[in-house]
């Protein structure tokens, strides 16, 4: 999986639930929230004041290490 700003958080978690610690360490503690299933990475980062590019890099590093 390749994650971008437009990737839905729920899709990332569905692809591999082991990404939860990455998201939570970044400050997205709302993985069970109804918004998480339809919110993009960019939208969540804006709402929570997070660095979107940093989170995307961490997620893509994780997925590329699995390949």
Image (cartoon, rainbow, N blue to C red):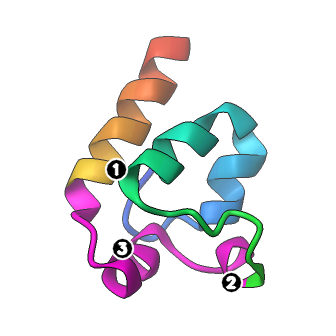
Residue located beneath label 3 in the image = 45
Magenta-drawn stretch, dominant element (helix, strand or loop): helix
- Front residue of 49/38: it is 49
- Front residue of 11/48: it is 48
Residue located beneath label 2 in the image = 35
Do residues under tags 3 and 1 come within 8 Å of each other at their CB atoms? Answer: no
x 39%, y 86%: residue: 47
The label nearer to you, 2 versus 1, is 2
Q: Which mark is residue 30?
A: none
**Residue 67 falls in which quadrant of the image?**
top right
Q: Secondary structure at mark 3?
A: helix
Do residues under tags 2 and 3 come within 8 Å of each other at their CB atoms? Answer: no
Do residues under tags 2 and 1 come within 8 Å of each other at their CB atoms? Answer: no
Q: Secondary structure at mark 1?
A: helix
Residue located beneath label 1 in the image = 56
x 69%, y 57%: residue: 11
The label nearer to you, 3 versus 1, is 3
Query: What span is in magenta?
Result: 35-53
**Residue 34 falls in which quadrant of the image?**
bottom right
Residue 66 at x, y percent in the picture: 55, 14
Q: For residue 2: magenta?
A: no
- Front residue of 61/35: it is 35
Distance CA(mark 3)–CA(mark 1): 10 Å
Distance CA(mark 2)–CA(mark 1): 19 Å
x 60%, y 63%: residue: 9
Q: Is residue 22 above or below residue 41?
A: above
Within 10 Å of the Cα at label 1, are there few (<14), some (14-19), or many (20+) other Cα atoms?
some
């Amino acid at each position: 999986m390749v994650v971008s700003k437009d990737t839905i958080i729920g899709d990332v978690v569905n692809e591999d639930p082991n990404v939860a610690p990455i998201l939570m360490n970044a400050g997205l503690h709302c993985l069970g929230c109804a918004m998480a299933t339809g919110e993009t990475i960019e939208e969540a980062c804006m709402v929570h004041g997070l660095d979107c590019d940093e989170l995307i890099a961490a997620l893509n590093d994780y997925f590329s290490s699995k390949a």
